Image (tube, rainbow, N blue to C red):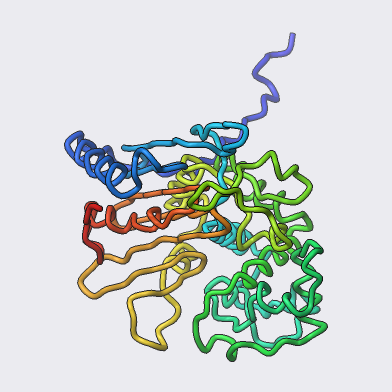
Amino acid sequence: MKSPFLNHEKKTPEISYFPEFEKLPNAEVKKMQKDAYAFYSTVLGKETFNGHFLVAKKGKVVFYKSQGFSNFREQEKISINTPLHVASVSKVVTAFTVLRLVDQGRILLDTDIRHYLREIPYKGITVRMLLNHRSGIPYYGYFTYDTWHLGTILRNYDIVRLLKKHKFPLNFPPDSKFAYCNTNYALLALIVEKATGKPFPKAVKELVLDPLKMKNTFVMNRSKQLSEVSQSYNSRHVNQNFDYLDAIYGDKNLYTTAFDLYQLDKASYSNNFLSDSLRKQMFKGYSYERPGKSNYGLGIRLKELEGKDTYFFHSGWWHGNTACYVTLRDDSTCIIALSNVYTKSVYSVNRLAAKFGNYPFTFTEE
């Protein structure tokens, strides 16, 4: 009789992408809950807010609210599992996807992007310059007005074809200054596809969403029924129609929840998810040609003021969707506000951050 212990294969231990955080004192939790509720009640507006709001610190969610409707016509309520379109906050996930591939040696940060996209007509633009918005490439939402039939859905690779065909002049020489531009991240999505041989939505799922168990997150593509996703509304609750730009991904088109986005935030502190070297390159400014408080890293915005801790965040707006993701690195604190009804109140989370650390803001109630 053979021993059941012979030839026994050892199971490979599952990789944990979430670090261990020190436990929060109860007094601190209660204070954060009080401050978060005050912000939710007076700034977001607890009677009118439509979306997700979450505050967490060191691996613990201290405050969460979801309310309103993802589809007013069908009276579909927003729950903890309802994905909303987070607009340019999508760039954070795109950046992590690219940097994970950099860690794997499948993308090189400082290589000319023509190595991946041979039809690009511009020399000297690197992957890093797309990530930190220093490429000089013009915005596709502008140059398509005169060069594209606006009744035809625009796809990511159509942008490359238009750049090749028309050779639009760069807005400035590569790496000479900062200019925020969605084209950069639409091209990064194509570079991910080239490096992986997979559609961008699938690559994001395998590299970020599945490892972090972000089960209610996806990158939108037009193969989905547009009526199935959360709808977008202006401030008067009028539905905002999809248009010819709504198939472009990388710069936008991520649908997610506050809890899923917080999964990503927790993993961002782990060397198993992103190497320490790349994390340092991500969370630093690159544009100091002119003095100012605002800067941009690799897929993240910065507010820097002497004598204050750096405030890291990314905001988003597309149609009626507004979003803000805040990651306070010195305090391991995360604040997320997402709405599918247009409101600028989500951008006011910087006031709440002032309660949690030495950041360049003050908390005021409206």
Across the whole image, how many numbered discs are drawn on residues? 0
In the image, residue 265 sits, relative to residue 3, either above or below, namely below
Q: Which residue reaches farthest top? A: 1
Q: Measured from the top left, where is residue 294 in percent x and y? A: 38, 74
Quarter location, residue 131? bottom right
Quarter location, residue 10? top right
Q: Measured from the top left, where is residue 175 in percent x and y? A: 55, 86
Q: Measured from the top left, where is residue 315 in percent x and y? A: 46, 60
Q: At 20% across and 72% down in the image, what residue appears?
A: 307
Q: Measured from the top left, where is residue 274 in percent x and y? A: 51, 56
Along the viewing direction, whichever of 251 and 245 lies nearer the viewer = 245
Tell me if I can see residue 218 in this picture.
Answer: yes
Along the viewing direction, whichever of 57 and 18 lies nearer the viewer = 57
In the image, residue 136 sits, relative to residue 104, either above or below, namely below
Q: At 79% across and 85% down in the image, what residue appears?
A: 166
Tell me if I can see residue 61 in this picture.
Answer: no
On screen, residue 26 versus residue 171, left or right, reads left
On screen, residue 102 versus residue 273, left or right, reads right
Along the viewing direction, whichever of 74 and 285 lies nearer the viewer = 74
On screen, residue 73 versus residue 286, left or right, reads right
Q: Which residue reaches farthest left? A: 27
In the image, residue 115 sits, relative to residue 60, either above or below, namely below
Quarter location, residue 115? bottom right
Q: At 68% across and 21% down in the image, what residue appears?
A: 6
On screen, residue 57 versus residue 16, left or right, reads left
> What quarter of the picture does the N terminus occupy?
top right
